[in-house]
Image (tube, helix red, strand yellow):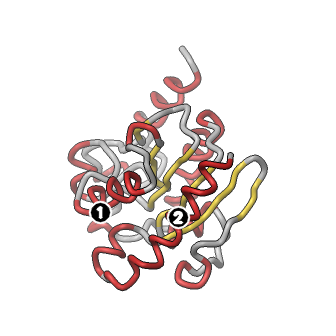
Amino acid sequence: MDKWEELKSFVYSCNRCRLSNGRKNIVFGEGNINAKLMFIGEGPGEEEDNTGRPFVGRAGMLLTKMIESIGLSREEVYIANIVKCRPPNNRVPFDDEAKVCINYLRKQVALIKPKIIVCLGATAAKYVIDENIRITKDRGVWYRRGNYFIIATFHPAALLRDESKKKLAWEDLKKIKSMYQSV
């Protein structure tokens, strides 16, 4: 068994935190496991929990458009979340839940080896970049961690709630496209 399937099997049998009690499906992630670009969100919502796929609701449709706006498709990138199970009522994952799941995400990153990681929203940025990050203030800034270029931008759900942020997100997407073309 290869390491990817071994990780997937381990995650699908996980019950290390309370989120496993209410899940319908594990949302492991999807896309190209050799992707140069990886998007990381907060956690699955109701539609994602029902389907077992990340970003399939309204925010997912917007993420797909965002990816396409930089000349790529969902199939060319990899999409995952900080937590693999839906938090009740789509609340933000608690620290203990995220800290259990972040190890799975780290293993995914280590196996995929993306050049660029995009944190979608404050929760992803908190656990991937820095616990004190402020998405409104710190989005659009590149961070270098080992072999990875990391940037945070607004979560697509935030863009649906506040369209005034779309211009800033577009600026971030242009930076991501430029970096993608240079790595």
The residue type indicated by label 1 comes to Ala
Residue 129 image point, x, y percent:
66, 65
171 in relation to 26, above or below: below
Residue name at image x 33 percent, y 70 percent = 157
Location of the N terminus by quadrant is top right
Choose top left, top right, bottom left or bottom right for residue 58. Answer: bottom left
3 in relation to 181, above or below: above
Q: Which mark is residue 45?
A: none
The residue type indicated by label 2 comes to Lys
Residue name at image x 40 percent, y 81 percent = 165
Residue name at image x 49 percent, y 53 percent = 39
Taking the image as shown, residue 72 lies to the left or right of residue 171, namely: left
Residue 97 image point, x, y percent:
49, 59
45 in relation to 48, above or below: below
- The tag earlier along the polypeptide, 2 or 1, is 1
Front residue of 69/143: it is 69
Residue name at image x 59 percent, y 72 percent = 140
Residue at the top extreme, as displayed: 1
Taking the image as shown, residue 154 lies to the left or right of residue 95, namely: left
The residue labelled by disc 1 is: 59
Q: Secondary structure at mark 2?
A: helix
Residue 2 image point, x, y percent:
56, 18
The reply to whether the C-beta atoms of the residues labelled 2 and 1 are less than 8 Å apart is no
Front residue of 66/158: it is 66
Q: How far separated are the C-alphas under marks 2 and 1?
A: 19 Å
Choose top left, top right, bottom left or bottom right for residue 161. Answer: bottom left
The residue labelled by disc 2 is: 174
Taking the image as shown, residue 182 lies to the left or right of residue 35, namely: right
